[in-house]
Image (tube, grey):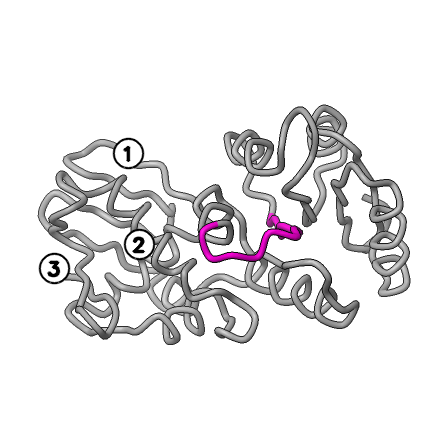
Amino acid sequence: MAGDATLVLVIDDDPQVRTLVSRLLRHEGYEVIEAGDAAEALRQVAQRDPDLVLLDVVMPQVDGIDLLAELRSDSQVPVIMLTALGNEADRILGLRSGADDYMVKPFSPGELSARIESVLRRAQKPANATQEAATAAFAFGALEIDPRTRDVRVNGELVELTAREFDLLCFLAGSPRQVFDRQQLLSQVWQSSAEWQDPATVTEHVRRIRRKIEADPDHPRWVLTVRGVGYRFEP
C-alpha cells in the first residue's frame, strides 16, 4: 500500500464495471487495484493486503460466494458484495459467507462511498463493550471470554471466532441477561444502523456464534433469543 491511502481491491469479471468503480474510488482518494477472476483476486490479496474488497457475486468459473469463502479461510479483510441479485435469500447467503455488507446494483456513487466508509469505520474501531471490558475476562461455567487476548474457550478448548463474532459475543456477555434488539446491536457492535447494514447480519452472526460455542446450537445455553425482541446472554 502506497502512503496512507486506503487500498481497495475491486473484483469483477466485467472490465467496464471495474473501470467505472475504480474511477469513482480514485476520485474519493482511495488507492485501487483490480482483479477480473478468482485467481488474480487471491494473488492480489496475498501480495497487496488490501484494506477492503468490493466483490461481484456473479462471475464465471469461481463465483463471488465461493471466492469469499476461500478468502475467509485465512483473511478477515472487510468485504462488500456487489450484485444484481437483490432478493433476501441472496443477501442472507452473502452474509452467511462472511460478507460485511451487501449492495444491489445499480447503486449511486454516493451510496457506495458511504458504505465503504461505514464498513472501514466498523473494521478499524473496536466495539464499545470490548473497549470497556479490556481489563477483565469473563467466565461462565465452561465458557471463558478474554477481551485482552480476544480468546474464547469452551471446556478449555480454544474456539476460533471472527473479529465481529468476538465483538458481538463480548458485548452480550458484558451485560448478562440484558435484552438487545438487532438495531441496538448494529449500533453498538457494528457502529452502524439498519439504513446502511442489513439487520439480518446480526441474526447470522448469532447463528454462527452458537454453532461454535454451544453444545446444541438449536437449544443454546448462553446466547438466547427473546422472541419478538432480540437477544440476551445467559450467564
**Circle 1 SS class:** strand
Tell me the quarter of the image containing the N terminus: top right
Q: Which mark is residue 235?
A: 3
Say how many tags the image has: 3
| Residue to which mark 2 is pinned | 206
Q: Is residue 90 magenta?
A: no
Q: Is residue 226 above or below residue 104?
A: below
**Mark 1 residue type:** Leu
Q: Which residues are magenta?
A: 78-89
Distance between the alpha carbons at the discs numbered 2 and 3: 16 Å
Residue at position x 79%, y 67% from top? 109
On the picture, is 104 further left or further right than 87? right
**Circle 2 SS class:** helix
**Circle 3 SS class:** loop
Q: Is residue 185 above or below residue 11?
A: below
Residue at position x 48%, y 65% from top? 198
On the picture, is 130 further left or further right than 223? right
Local crowd at mark 3 within 10 Å, few (<14), some, or many (≥20)?
some
| Residue to which mark 1 is pinned | 158
Q: Position of residue 57 (x, y in %)?
A: 63, 42
Q: Position of residue 47 (x, y in %)?
A: 75, 29
Q: Is residue 82 magenta?
A: yes
**Relative depth, front residue between 86 and 154:** 86
For the residues carrying marks 2 and 3, which lies nearer the camera in this image? 2
Q: Is residue 163 visible?
A: no
Q: Earlier in the sequence, mark 3 or mark 1?
A: 1
Q: Is residue 61 above or below residue 197?
A: above
Residue at position x 77%, y 54% from top? 6
Local crowd at mark 2 within 10 Å, few (<14), some, or many (≥20)?
some
Q: Is residue 17 above or below residue 73?
A: below
On the picture, is 209 further left or further right than 29? left
Instruction: Indicate the quadrant where residue 9 lies.
Output: top right
